[in-house]
Image (spheres, coloured by chain):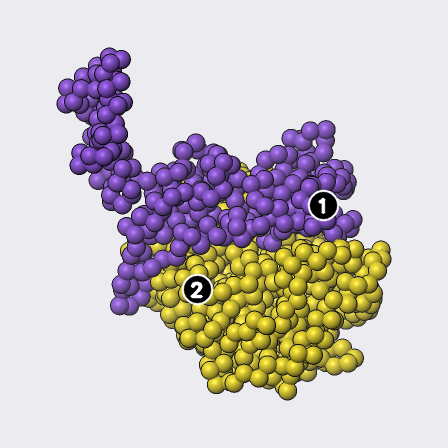
Amino acid sequence: MEVKIAIKRSNAQTNGKAISQAYSIEMDGNRTLLDGLIRIREEQDPTLAFRGSCGTGFCGDCTMTVNGKGAVACRTKLGKALKKADDGIIEVGPLKLAKVAKDLMYDAENFHWQKFKAVEPWVDPVAPPAKGENVVANDEVQDLRAVMSCTQCGLCDQGCTVLVVDKTFLGPAALTKAYRAVFDSRDSRTAERLQKLSMRRGMWDCTHCFEASEHCPKRIEPTDRIFALHDKAIKAEAGPPKVVHHYKSFAASVKAHGWLDEARLAVETEGFTNVRGLMKLLPFAVKAGIKGKHPLPYMLHKKRPGAEHIKRIFEKWEDNGK
Amino acid sequence: MPQHDVIVIGGGFAGLRAALEARASSADVAVLSKVHPMRSHSSGAHSGVNAALKSGDSWQDHAKDTIEAGAYLCDQKAVEVLCKNASEDVVALERMGVIFNRDSDGRIDVMPFAGSSHPRTCYAGDSAGHVILQVLYEQVLRSQIPTYDEWFVSSILVEDGMCKGVVARELKTGQNHAFYAKAVILATGGLGRVYSPSTCSLTGTADGPALAYRAGAPLVDMEMVQYHPTTLSDRGILITEAARGEGGRLVNKDGDRFMAASDAGAMEMAARDVCSRAVHAEIQEGRGENGNVYLDLRHLDKGRISDRLRETLWLLEDLEDLDPSKDLIPVRPAMHRPIGGVRVDTFGATGLPGLYAAGECASTGAHGANRLGGNSLLDCVVFGRRAGEAAARHSRGATWHPPQESLAIAETAGFNEIASRAPGKDTPGIIRRELGSLMNRKVGILRDEAGLKDAASVLRNLKERHSRLGLRDKDAAYNTDIISAAELGNMLDVAEIIIAAALARRESRGCHYRTDFPQRDDVKWLRRSVATRSTRGPIINSAPVVVTQWNPAERNPAR
């Protein structure tokens, strides 16, 4: 079939402005976009720059934008892409959030690898066994393998709603990589890692929008991995104190009363001994009192109807957690 | 001028393993790779790594299987090193953080693989390659080994009979730099792009063998080119041997398990070359459909394969809309791996002082005439480690004597000359496609003298066209056109050697099957072929096979 592809091109001469160039190739719709790009480069235009390596979706090298959405070119079938294309022309461009280097190539060092390195993703072993391999349960291995099937294609980062506004956020790809070290029982630095991930622009900047999980082509569920890191940090009290207090207070309040006691949440998040923090809350407390929002001592917070059912849910979940 | 004690060319398994070992031996080591290390072809290796870890198995059994699979062309000393070190090197990988599947005791699990007498392949689902590559890269970061990502090496600097470094081009800037080193380790991986289709990534362009050959180091056993029996239609996309290890069956269009005719005992678990030829014959004799036979996984336990073949199932879903629990998978053989490469000893030494090689671009002779599945990753970690150790040792004993600057300038000028030529009708891609198709048709599973001579003459024409090739891309930054042209030059040089070596070997053994000489001939050809460069092209000589304790015998087709 005839496949029309319009490619956003730029190089040093275009001063960062992209020019759309149209190509037409004759190719089976069952073949992939990467096959199509190779054909264009081989037969029509050897000046076209793009990355690609394994061609089977294992190396993550050929990520780009296809019809406005992030995609891995070697897992994108031409026929399907054509169906989703406006005017029967597949629109291809570089990844949107990364700095463009040339044509479809982008600055991968800054987009992927700096952040990958920042989470120190290697295993720092606890004392290894005297002989042979570490004994590890297969369930743990399977979970880690799911995470390690990440190819650093960058699609989760591309979909991230925080990175759009703040490129310095660590991002779901690097955080998913961090999960690999944090949850590997052979690693000795769990608490320290969680502290580090709590840095500015670190894991607590995730807004839980689930876009990363939506965008992951390997079904790794990066958002859930970030939740798991949060959870582990709270349990180990390894996150920033305010964050840990906030999470714990939130849960304790809902467990006790069936709904959220915002006064309690505010006080406990700041911490009882944090006089300066509590003083800051005072004007809000006064205003809330005047408006009839009753920031009473939370011991007097009313239970919502059916609160005992909610408590049971908590208890059941806590039992499962053990 | 950047300089390091040891420079490793290539960021896949062998390269990263070598770099780690050189670093552990206190050498100042750096990795140069034309793609980011995590984009290396190693990421696409599905299968696993062989080691006789379990009781009842032994390194001797592993060695015997390796030698039989290699049709007795193996250097048995190299096989002994490979198999004796396997357990320790695999355990070392685990300790670095590789997440091998576990048995019920939490120990590394093994699976059966074609050609192996015991289940011996340690695996990580069906993505061992991707997992091991990640872990090695993690460790490289941990060891603070500098990596030069997206640097293409265009030549090796040789002066006074010594390797003194390399010339490389930075893709980002288009600048050429000379790197001085006391030792260079080639770990550039495969040469699959010489063939089309091939299971190899776009990066497998024979760079290491071509660089070594031009620097004066010989190549061995280049006629041995392994085809994998199960790849998707004409895409060259691999369906892992683990699919057969799990019990997958090969059937023809009538639903017959045709492997019974080749080897009723081993069936689908027959050695790769045996299996590929059987599939090829089935298709040629009209019992295939649309040029394929079928891989049948429908009878396998769904839960079990959804974990163990997880990536494969997604691949089939994404690319072929197939559900293997309901559908047959159309497969055919495609070029998979070279068995030969840069001639090295078991410490990666090429014979040219300071030049080492390891992994798929090198050949210790351990794989003979056909590589056993699961031995390839093992080769990279065992011989990669040893090359790293040896290169570091060499650099400790060597003093710095950088080459004359004029040498680096001359090498750079040669590389740049192609960019200055005016473009014509030809592109590197057009020539590469013709090359790939030629090699697959004439120098593939079945060969004969007429076809090989034909291939040699077409190849001369392709080389001539390459020598006149002009480039359209005149950019300095990110000029992939000039890299493609250089890679094509490497592939053409190596293709010429493959053809010459295939013409020279007038017998059939392992991967090399001559329809005009269908018998194995131990009297004349229990010898390894050695290719050296001359002004008139490659010269093919031969060298005896090293036999230690396994005397050449009739090969059990299962091995």
Q: Position of residue B43 (x, y in %)?
A: 52, 56
Mark linked to residue A187: none
Mark linked to residue B144: 2
Q: Identify by letter the chain in purple.
A: A
Q: Vertical placement of B272 versus B402: above or below? A: above
Q: How many marks?
A: 2
Q: Colour of chain B?
A: yellow
- Which chain letter goes with mark 2? B
The kind of residue on which mark 1 rests is Thr
Q: Vertical placement of B37 versus A104: above or below? A: below
The quadrant of the rendering that contains the C terminus of chain A is top left
Q: Position of residue A269 (x, y in %)?
A: 25, 33
Question: Disc 1 to disc 2, how far (Cα)?
Answer: 37 Å
Q: Quadrant of residue B485?
A: bottom right
Q: Quadrant of residue A250?
A: top left
Q: Position of residue A207 (x, y in %)?
A: 41, 33
Q: Residue at x 59, y 59 (%)?
A: B150
Element carrying mark 1 = helix
Q: Position of residue B171 (x, y in %)?
A: 64, 59
Q: Is residue B175 visible?
A: yes
Q: Residue at x 52, y 56 (%)?
A: B38
Along the line of sight, the residue nearer the viewer: A230 or A38: A230
In this rendering, position of residue B435 left or right of residue A212: right
- Which chain letter goes with mark 1? A
**Residue corresponding to mark 1:** A14
Along the line of sight, the residue nearer the viewer: B92 or B369: B92
Element carrying mark 2 = loop
Instruction: Report crowding for label 1: few under 14, some 14 to 19, many 20 or more residues within 10 A (C-alpha).
Output: few
Q: Residue at x 67, y 75 (%)?
A: B408
Q: Residue at x 63, y 49 (%)?
A: A101
Q: Are marks 1 and 2 in contact (CB under 8 Å)?
A: no
